[in-house]
Image: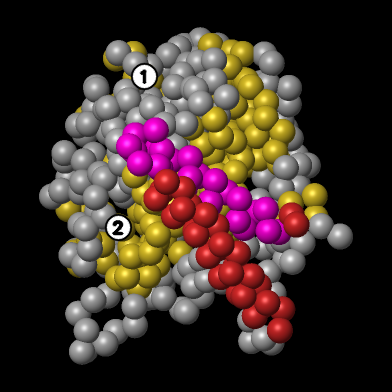
Amino acid sequence: MTKDLIANLIMPSSYFLFKELKLKKHKNTEPVRLAYRFYVIYLFAVLGSSTLKAQTDPSVEPQIAEAIYFEKRHIASENYESVSVFDVNNDGAIDIVSGAFWYQGPSFKKRHDMGGPKRFGEYYDHFSTIPLDVNSDGNIDFVTGGWYEGRLVWKENVGDKSPWPEHLIAEVGNIESTRAWDIDGDGVVEIIPNTPNGPLRIFYLENGSFKEKVLADKQGHGIGYGDINGDGRGDLIMPHGWLEAPENRFEGEWKLHEEFQLGTASVPIMVTDVNKDGLSDMIVGQGHGYGLFWYEQLPVNKKKDVKWKKHNIDPYNSQYHTMEMEDLDGDGIKELITGKRYKAHNGKDPGGYDSIGLYYFRWTGESFSKQVIDYGSYGEGKGTGVYFAVSDVNQDNRKDVIVAGKDGLTIFLNKAVKEK
């Protein structure tokens, strides 16, 4: 096992465990220190044996370490919590769009004013930036909305003119964030706002305007999408259960399966087959508390009524409010990218003032290995905001991470280098 591989597997987990035990709060720190030392020894033993098994057992697919380096580039000190990337002016370069501004690529130095969302205390009412050519004019617009006004809107792309006209889609109540998935498979995404205090609605484009479909009377904090039961149709996941998609998405009834309780779940909840057993699992962060977990879907067993088994990914960090899955190292396998939403409730959440981190996680075949992109106190580390992007902004065939938040707007340029 190489020193780099040991560092990648061991150091992030043990370091953050030790750091976040808050030793100064304990009157007697010696037991905690001993527990930490035991934990490190345990990790070496377990990971060493699992790596050896991967090297000697032909049934275990070998894990090839990939060194990924990120170049941190500060773009702006604005504290909007949502960012996306797309070609605003159709010049072939990717631009950054966040809050009231878009930053012209490829340098992102020139900033254009679009007219901003309203501010309420420490928040801007701007909790998504979903690219979508709503009016089919060849210019990419975006969909957004916020908690305070409760309005789901789309902003019309008029290039470097200001302001971009704002068009009301619907008044839906408090919006935690909004996501878009192609529910009916027609190649055009549907818009799904997460309104914890209201019903679950989807909005779909039809003849140039948005139509509304109510799927459930309540939804709670968190929303996800994916094929849970393997019937080839994408289902919707809420904190208290999943909605089974009917054959006709907009006319049929979505059946609720109340099989779990996920708490103040992330937006989105990820659906993926984590352990490659042919069953879809879920990855869930706690948006306003500690913890990142995956829920294993178990095979049907009439003797057992437990269908979902909860596993830790990282229980030691708080406010895992949003996440994405993308292939960062070019090996064809997607990594989980997530981190802390800085001051999600203005510091009132558990761990609200903890150090800020941005991470990616690799599945090793047995568990998730945590890798640090950035970490530190405010002004040093960087978090995710409430909606972020993973995209190749400089067109070098490596996917970069673009994050906004109350801690500023930053690009992490992917400088992946394979081990030889």
Q: Position of residue 122 (x, y in %)?
A: 34, 16
Residue furthest to the left in view is: 217
Mark 2, other Cα within 10 Å: few <14 / some 14–19 / many ≥20: many
Q: Nearer the viewer, residue 395 or 355?
A: 355
Query: As drawn, is 26 to the left or to the right of 381?
Result: left
Q: 171 above or below 360?
A: above
Task: Depth check: give the residue in front, 332 or 265.
Answer: 265
Marks 1 and 2, how far apart at CA: 27 Å
123, 12: nearer the viewer: 12
| Quadrant location, the N terminus | bottom right
Residue 393: x %, y % from top left: 68, 35
Image quadrant occupied by the C terminus = bottom right
Colour mode?
Answer: secondary structure
Q: Quadrant of residue 185?
A: bottom left
Q: Position of residue 293 (x, y in %)?
A: 38, 57
Return the residue at label 2: 237
Q: Mark 1 or mark 2: which comes first in sequence?
A: 1
Tell me if 268 is positioned left or right of 147 in this view: right
Majority SS type along the magenta span: helix
On the image, which quarter does residue 167 sit in? top left
Question: As shown in the figure, which amino acid type bears the numbered disc 2?
Answer: Ile
Residue annotated with mark 1: 124
Q: What amino acid is found at the position of numbered circle 1 in the picture?
A: Tyr
Residue at 72% x, 42% y is 69
Is 406 contained in the magenta span?
no
Is residue 406 something one can see in this rendering?
yes
What segment is highlighted magenta in the picture? 5-29
Residue depicted at x 61% and y 13%: 111
Q: Residues within 10 Å of mark 1 (few under 14, many from 20)?
A: many
Residue at image location 68% in from the left, 69% down from the top: 63
x and y percentages locating residue 341 in the rendered image: 42, 34
Label 2: element kind:
strand
